[in-house]
Image (cartoon, rainbow, N blue to C red):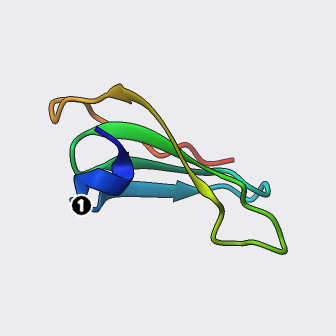
Amino acid sequence: MSVANAKQGFRYVSISREQGQIWAISGAGIICRRIGVTHENPAGTGWVTGIGVSSENKFQRVKN
């Protein structure tokens, strides 16, 4: 299932200080990375999806 077709929004979104580093976990539990993010196109061009995540997984914020 693609993120565009899921229509469930995101459970979590993480934005890095580095340009183009936007990661999210979809409502269906799919890890996603935003692609095509530039200063000229801050909305990006699409999503690359990865492995599924169960609701039992715990996430911890890492401070730089």
Q: Position of residue 51 (x, y in %)?
A: 37, 24
Please give the count of numbered marks on the rendered protein: 1
Q: Farthest left residue?
A: 56
In this view, the residue in front, 15 or 2, is 2
Residue 53, x across and y down, in percent: 27, 30
Q: Report the residue that reaches farthest toward the top.
A: 51
Q: Residue at x 23, y 51 (%)?
A: 27
20 on left or right of 54: right
Position in image of residue 47 (x %, y %): 53, 48
Q: Position of residue 18 (x, y in %)?
A: 78, 54
49 or 19, nearer to the observer: 49
From the viewer's side, name the closer residue of 64 and 21. Answer: 21
State which quadrant residue 62 falls in. top right
* 18 up-or-down from 58: above or below: below
Residue type at mark 1? Lys
Left or right, 9 with respect to 44, comes to left
Residue at screen point 46% across, 42% down = 32
- The secondary structure type at the circle numbered 1 is loop
Is residue 10 positioned above or below 52 on the image? below
Task: Between residue 11 and residue 37, name the one nearer to us.
Answer: 37
Q: Quadrant of the N terminus?
A: top left
Whether residue 14 sits left or right of residue 12 in the image: it is right
Neighbours of disc 1 within 10 Å: few (<14), some (14-19), many (20+) = few
Q: Which residue is mark 1?
A: 7
Q: Identify which residue is drawn at 41% across, 37% down.
A: 31
